[in-house]
Image: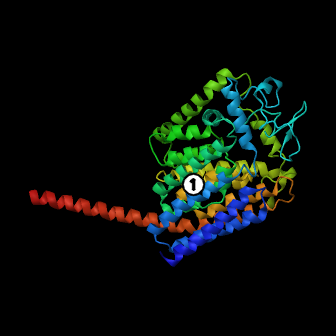
Amino acid sequence: MSRHMLFVGGVLLALAAVVAQMVAGPPRLGWYLLAWALFAAALWLARRVPERQLTALVVAGGVVLSAIGLAAPPSSSTDSYRYAWDGRVQAAGISPYDHVPASPALAPLRDDWLFPPECTAPELWPLPGGGCTRINRPTVPTIYPPVAQGYFLLVHWLSPDGVRHKVLQLGGWVMAVLVLLALCRQAGVRTAAYWAWCPSVPVEAVNNAHVDMLGVLLVVLAFCTVRPRGALLGAAVAAKLLPATALPGALSGALANGVAWRRVLRIAVPAALAAGLAYLPYVLTARAPVVGYLLGYLREERYEAPGDGNRYVVLRLVMPDSWAPYAAILLLALIVLYVLRHGDPERPWHGALVVTGSLLLLFTPGYSWYALLVVALAAMDNRWEWLGVALAGAIAYVAGPAAHPSPAMPFYAAATLAVLIGWAVRRPCEAGIRKTMLALAERLQSRTRRHQESSVSRKD
């Protein structure tokens, strides 16, 4: 066993201890910063570990680190309580879009876990008619799309009585491990470490059991295959809307020489069919709109009033607040167009990473689990500079929406700068590599042609 491997193993043990502290109680900024510092140190030290030895550290380390999230109830998010409720409502034959959790019509489905008789805990939400619940925003409809709802129903069916949040956490752990194995096969263990050791995975994917993990898994599987790619991406969008940012990546270069209609249809039609078929049962049975609380969520997050929140923090450093929403939309549209015209169709995950990461840097959401997709795509594309997006999101979430100015602002700015520097440094190198590969291909074609000509002349 090499000395460098021992160093990496020691850092990972320290990281595991810090992650255990992170999931054991409410989020604290110091623990998050320490965890990310150890994560960065492990990646740096792993550069000198032989790949054969590194495989054990990446796979075993990723499995164990993510399993730490199973050790405690959700520590920093109450979303999993809504998941459990939506599954229970569906099991009773009721559409989750028709009634809010506080509705008296659903009172027979309440239990002491989700609706405790004692309302003394700080994380409980009051009900209009008295009482309280663990479900956040109990007076608004669910926001989650139909594939997510199917997952909630499946978890409900598989959950023994009294298991509470554990099956949701276990599902998050299984999906995190599947993503790790897929990344090891697709990108190699060295870059799969970006996912395996990232502190966001045990905290957000497993401990808080965010359904974003389902969308991440579907996107990763989509980019590990070719034929069912469109259908998997459509299912990912119907699990959590954010994976829609992976669709331009799947169409990288489709506008390079006109419109590659065959490629566009091969991706867009199965994606639309998969998403449409997922929505169809809920559209036919629900009495309320299946968009749920989506529009209310956008208003709640102050995307319409950037000066009254912590959205668009990077853009607001260089322009008036009122310009920021329009600039964010315009820049994102230009980035999508760039990917569609100049993206590499052989590396669709790169375009997906650029669009997804850019969206988070431009709109700066305050929820750290949104960046799980960025972490997975950064591992697939070997672009460590994009990991700063996940760190900035974590800082924004720990600080909370009331922090003005948000301490996440310098982290989002630094993440943006890292991405721009990485792009400036890599582009000449990649151009040189492409030029070299083209030259080699031309030489190979020339030699093949000469060989064929010589063979013909010998026959003559």
Q: Give x and y (percent) for residue 96.
A: 71, 29
Q: Quadrant of residue 131?
A: top right
User: What kind of colouring is applied to the model shown?
Assistant: rainbow
User: In the drawing, does residue 454 fall left or right of residue 15?
Assistant: left
Q: Is residue 414 above or below residue 287?
A: below
Residue in the picture at 48% in, 57% down = 184
Is residue 21 or residue 431 the one in the foreground? Answer: 21
Q: Quadrant of residue 25?
A: bottom right
Q: Give x and y (percent) for residue 277.
A: 57, 28
Residue at the left extreme?
460
In the rendered view of the protein, which quadrant contains the C terminus? bottom left
Q: Is residue 295 above or below residue 453?
A: above
Q: Residues within 10 Å of mark 1 (few under 14, many from 20)?
A: many
Q: Give x and y (percent) for residue 92.
A: 69, 24
Residue in the picture at 70% in, 40% down = 164
Is residue 383 or residue 194 the one in the foreground? Answer: 194
Q: Secondary structure under badge 1?
A: helix
Q: Give x and y (percent) for residue 262.
A: 46, 38
Question: At label 1, which amino acid type do we have?
Answer: Leu
Q: Is residue 359 visible?
A: no
Q: Quadrant of residue 298?
A: top right
Count of labels shown? 1
Question: Label 1, on which residue?
Answer: 377
Is residue 52 or residue 6 the one in the foreground? Answer: 6
Residue at the bottom extreme?
3
